[in-house]
Amino acid sequence: MTDQTTNSIAFVADGNIPQSPPPARETGVVKWMRENLFSSWANSLLTIVAGLVIYMVLSGALPWMWNGVWTTSSLSECREVLAGEVGGCFSVLSERWNQLLFGFQYPQDQYWRPTLAFVLLFIAGAPVLFFDLPRKMLAFTAVYPFLAFYLIWGGTIMAPIVAFLGMGAAAFVFQTYGKGSFALGFFGAIVAAFAVWIIGGALIPEGASETAMLQAVPSRDLGGFMLNLMLGVTCVSLSVPLGIALALGRQSDMPLIKWICIIFIEFVRGVPLITLLFVASVMLSYFFPPDSTVDLFLRVVIMITMFSAAYIAEVIRGGLAALPKGQYEAADSLGLDYPQAMRLIILPQALKISIPGIVNVAVGLFKDTTLVSVISMFDLVGMIRGPILASTEWAGVYWELLGAAAILFFIVCYGISQYSQWLERRLATDHR
Amino acid sequence: MSDLAIEREIDRTKMSVSDEVAIQITGMNKWYGQFHVLRDINLTVNRGERIVIAGPSGSGKSTMIRCLNALEEHQEGQIIVDGTELTSDLKNIDKIRSEVGMCFQHFNLFPHLTILENCTLAPIWVRKMPKKEAEDLAMHFLEKVKIPDQANKYPGMLSGGQQQRVAIARSLCMKPRIMLFDEPTSALDPEMIKEVLDTMIELAEEGMTMLCVTHEMGFARQVANRVIFMADGQIVEQNEPEEFFNNPQSDRTKQFLSQILGH
Ligand SMILES: Nc1ncnc2c1ncn2[C@@H]1O[C@H](COP(=O)(O)OP(=O)(O)OP(=O)(O)O)[C@@H](O)[C@H]1O
Ligand SMILES: [Mg+2]
């Protein structure tokens, strides 16, 4: 190199040779296909087979969707319009859309109430899911369950207010006494909440629901996709904290707590959910005071929550086990007490590790809410299998209805999955 | 292992030892199941002492200093740290832990928190210090260990030596009266060992009471005022560094020194 530059320079180009375009096989689509689809004969074969499969599926599905009929009011009418051609009878969706969403008994002039609750859900959920948002928004999140309850079930406004006051009393007791002794704060909070609920419940006048501003809607009138969403949101948000408590309890040094948690987890995991749901629908009332009629919705929520909490507890236990012992020791050596160490050091890391597992359980739970159709609750699947397919107008329209149900569930589950991936990226701080 | 040359003149003016007792261990025994790890340990540490604990692997050095802040439980004997006796009483344990700082071989920084948050966490939650004040304090100690510019990074982005210095700063933020080190440099490369040892020397110069398990004999020679040699769960020998290195008494010690000094 040095020789050439210092002396004996025979020829030096005195201008740039203009760039010429690369040959066609090195650019764009052709290059991409050659590299990705036809790089070897095996790859080429797979490409061709896959292409055929895609063609077959699309050639069946596309005309069916394209020719779909959206405006008839029964299956026979739809068949007439189609006159033997391939096409879907999507008019069942447009005609029964409200039933698919809200069930067939929710008063039609009140549809705005669950819709409003659904919209507000996003505002309430935002500060929990996206923790960069201002913490003040959590105030609305705290009120939301009671507001949503009032919107969906209606009746006397006293009921959610009493429920809210009970929770407020519990929080207050825990704040004041929980610092001294965790057990005192914890059980004190439970007692305070029940005291407020019982006294408050007794104060609500008989028949207040009949004259209420919002018409009361009993639980058995809830249905459709709304019911799936309600069960999914309620059970996920209850089972994550319960699962954390169970996972920590399982690690506890106190034998009694440890054994209660282990037995609970192992028992609930060992029983099919559908069994628990049957228990909820027929037997659970034995466990409540004889004259109380505990709502079916509540019983189902309890069962699904227990079921998924057991799974989430095991997922979180995996996360806890994955943390190096040094993290506990560092927290201890700084003088943090057990609740502080857990809340500030251990759980943030263990939960981060557990996100994929928790999301897995959450997605599964949401889809499992369709199981309530077997205990004669009319959720989305229950509506399809029951009132809609049993009607004279729409008997026999399977693909369109079940396809629509699949799409609705897919949208929600895909959303959850995307959120969890965002969350994992957002929390990635260790660049090891 | 190496006799790391500590270039700087060490300022011994403040490194005086007072008569006040900082730690007193009497007749301590500890078992892991059937295994008798610590046998009849007796040790008194005065305020301002710098003690280096040496000994072969598995001799119970870590176990002993971890007993001092109750990371391990002892079954027999008495440990009094800073006037408080270590019992199973959680109040005493928490009190002692907030007075005693500890640095680990693997740093044990909290990877989900920034360097600054690592340092402010304990002052805020244990000392109930306002956030602003805790941050000022943390920056003060981060400057002291010479990494204030890394304050907003996460531990995973720092080198080993920097992480260990953060760990020291994190302990210092609790204004401890005693510092325990368990092989703070043995997971580090030579250049990083030096920066961590420099930080520890500065601490010693300010009169901190230190107990340090280490194989850095250069550090022991120049900073320690007493070297303790442990083997098989016992304190076999203790002496001033000069005496300890030049005139070891027991055969166990001689054997160990010949191995560790590499001849
Ligand atoms: N949790 C435990 N259960 C049972 N035995 C243990 C436990 N921790 C340590 N030991 C044993 O106790 C002995 C002392 O361990 P310790 O960690 O104190 O040694 P050390 O002197 O620090 O050694 P090193 O220089 O390798 O760190 C070892 O024989 C070890 O195997
Ligand atoms: Mg050790």
Image: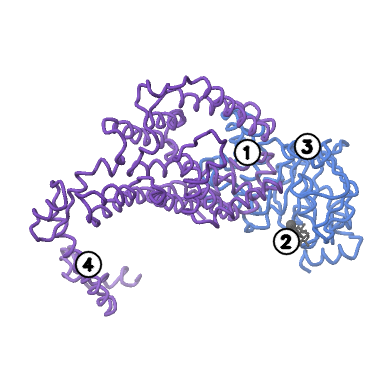
Chain A, hue in figure: purple
Left or right of B70: which side holds B28? right
Q: What element carries label 2?
A: loop
For label 4, the residue is: A54
Mark 4 or mark 3: which is in front?
A: 4
Q: Are marks 1 and 4 in contact (CB under 8 Å)?
A: no
Left or right of A136: which side holds B252? right
Left or right of A372: which side holds A40? left
Q: Whole-percent x and y of residue A242? A: 55, 43
Mark 4 or mark 2: which is in front?
A: 4
Q: Quadrant of residue B236?
A: bottom right
For label 1, the residue is: A340
Q: Give the distance between the C-alpha atoms of the residues marked 1 and 3, in whole angstroms.
A: 17 Å
Q: Give the distance between the C-alpha atoms of the residues marked 4 and 2, in whole angstroms.
A: 67 Å
Mark number, residue B92: 3
Chain B, hue in figure: blue
Q: Residues within 10 Å of mark 2 (few under 14, many from 20)?
A: few
User: Going 38% across and 39% down the picture, which residue do you hit?
Assistant: A220
